[in-house]
Image: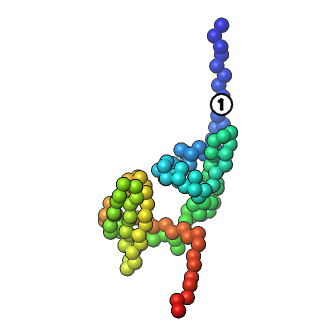
Amino acid sequence: MPRKRRSVERAKGPTDVLTAREAAKYLRLALPTFYRYMWEGKIPSSKIGGRYRFKQSLLDRWLGKTPGGDDVSGRNKFVGKVSRIKRDAILAQVNLDVGEHKITAVITRDALEELGLKVGDTAVALMKATEVMIIKEH
């Protein structure tokens, strides 16, 4: 007599716990970049059943999102034009002209390709400072 297969029904509806692949997609990070951040302890994670899992609410907090509000404070967003892109095998340097100021960001080449940035594109620099130091010059 053939064995009956038991099916495990997944809970329907949104879940707050994500796999690594789901979390990387949610954060819009290339999977290798996501894993690097995870191993460096930059991304909040938990080990459940021998596997890493990521709570969406903690990822939101990590991103600086507030429930029901803007994802990032307007003071931390700078809209400008991409003026230069310098690539190597792993990283890319992106220069953004914001008014009379220039912002330079170093991102992974994977991230650059995912964003599809080109010189002349409009882009937004999002600032997330974890530490600011001020010193007085003598």
The secondary structure type at the circle numbered 1 is loop
Q: Is residue 68 visible?
A: no
Q: Nearer the viewer, residue 1 or 86?
A: 86
Q: Which residue is mark 1?
A: 9
Q: Residue 3: give x, y in percent of width and height.
A: 65, 13
Q: Image quarter for residue 131? A: bottom right
Q: Nearer the viewer, residue 75 or 107?
A: 107
In the image, taking residue 112 as reference, residue 24 lies left or right, namely right
What colour-coding does the image apply?
rainbow
Q: Residue 32: give x, y in percent of width and height.
A: 48, 49
In the image, taking residue 100 as reference, residue 66 lies left or right, namely right
Q: Residues within 10 Å of mark 1 (few under 14, many from 20)?
A: few
Name the image quarter holding the N terminus. top right
Give amino acid for label 1: Glu
For residue 86, above or below residue 26: below
- The residue positioned farthest toward the top in the image shown: 1
Residue found 43% across the figure and 64% down from its top? 106
Q: Is residue 40 visible?
A: yes
Q: Residue 121: give x, y in percent of width and height.
A: 34, 63
Residue found 66% across the figure and 22% down from its top? 6
For residue 11, above or below residue 109: above
Residue found 58% across the figure and 69% down from its top? 130
For residue 10, above or below residue 83: above
